[in-house]
Image (cartoon, grey):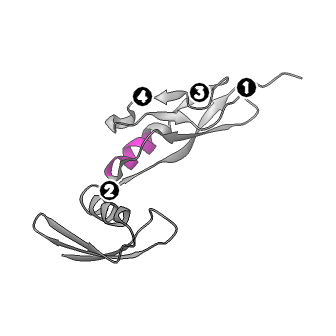
Amino acid sequence: MNKEMICIVCPLSCHLNVTQNNDEITVSGNSCPRGAIYAQKELTHPTRMLTSTVAIANAGIQLLPVKTSQAIPKEKMKDVMKIISKIHVSAPIKREDIIVKNIAQSGADLIASRSVSIKKRT
């Protein structure tokens, strides 16, 4: 199997040519070793960081930005988003607070991307 892809590890955006014969993967076109590692991982087990928002109460904002603590398998994205769509939290929240541990058994925690104080009543 031959596949072309663009490396997203650094700003060079190298055009990679990836060939797979059984268990052997050959990568060309990369300017650095990270490109080869990226191509192999992307071909065998692609992962992505996920960023989103969850509803938040008692705050000056309606949505709290969240992210996964590490890249998660691409095949888990829909499961994670289904869980995220049902989450409601309340202020106060501190940046890096864990919202959901091991979300969708992905191996990653869902964490707050910012701190939010309780909205002061006027």
Q: Main secondary structure of the magenta part?
A: helix
Q: Measuring 44% from the left and 62% from the top, which residue is drawn there?
A: 9
Give how far apart the Cα atoms at labels 4 and 1 are.
Answer: 22 Å
Amino acid at dot 1 = Ser
Locate residue 93 relative to residue 20 in the image: left or right.
right
Q: Distance between the residues labelled 3 and 2?
A: 30 Å
Foreground of the two, 91 or 33: 33
Label 3, label 1: how far apart the Cα atoms are: 12 Å
Kindly identify the amino acid type of the residue bearing the numbered disc 2.
Answer: Pro
User: Marks 4 and 1: CB-CB under 8 Å?
Assistant: no
Q: Which of marks 3 and 1 is in front?
A: 1
Residue 101 marker? 4
Residue 101 percent coordinates (x, y): 42, 28
Quadrant in which the C terminus is drawn: top right
- Residue 67: x and y, percent? 52, 42
Residue at the disc numbered 3: 89
The 10 Å Cα crowd at callout 1, few under 14, some 14 to 19, many 20 or more, is some
Residue at which label 2 appears = 46
Question: Residue at 41% of width from left, 68% of height from top?
Answer: 7
Residues 76 and 87: in front is 76
Where in the figure is residue 48, as x and y percent of width and height?
41, 52
Range shown magenta:
75-82
